[in-house]
Image (spheres, rainbow, N blue to C red):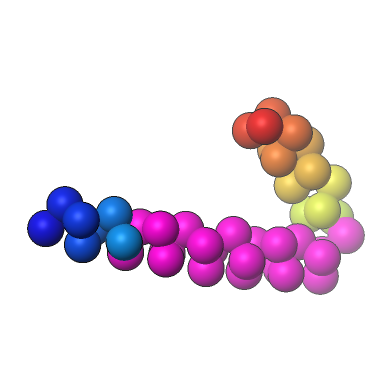
Amino acid sequence: LSCDIKQWASRHRRHRFRYRRRHRRGRSKSRKQNVGYAKLKE
């Protein structure tokens, strides 16, 4: 079960990151906030 969850999380995380990156490019206003958030996360 643990392995299955890990696999799902990895797949879900990748998809979320991809969607976020694509969505971030669409909004310029949100882009500024996202950039700051990304910097803080890193």
Q: Is residue 2 left or right of residue 11?
A: left
Residue positioned 31% across, 61% down in the render: 7
Q: In this view, does 38 lie above or below 14?
A: above
Residue 16: x %, y % from top left: 53, 63
Q: In this view, does 31 lie above or below 42?
A: below
Q: Does 6 appear in magenta? A: no
Q: Is residue 20 left or right of residue 16?
A: right
Residue positioned 82% across, 53% down in the render: 31
Residue 25 placement: quadrant? bottom right
Residue situated furthest front in the rendering: 3
Q: Nearer the viewer, residue 14 or 40?
A: 14
Residue 24 placement: quadrant? bottom right
Magenta span? 8-28
Residue positioned 70% across, 38% down in the render: 37
Q: In which quarter of the image is the C terminus?
A: top right
Q: Does 19 appear in magenta? A: yes
Q: Nearer the viewer, residue 24 or 11?
A: 11
Residue 18: x %, y % from top left: 62, 66
Q: Is residue 36 left or right of residue 40?
A: right
Residue positioned 72% across, 69% down in the render: 22
Q: In which quarter of the image is the N terminus?
A: bottom left
Q: Is the magenta stretch mostly helix, strand or loop?
A: helix
Q: In this view, does 38 lie above or below 27?
A: above
Residue situated furthest right in the rendering: 28
Residue 15: x %, y % from top left: 52, 68
Q: How many labels does the image show?
A: 0
Q: In this view, does 7 lie to the left or right of 11?
A: left
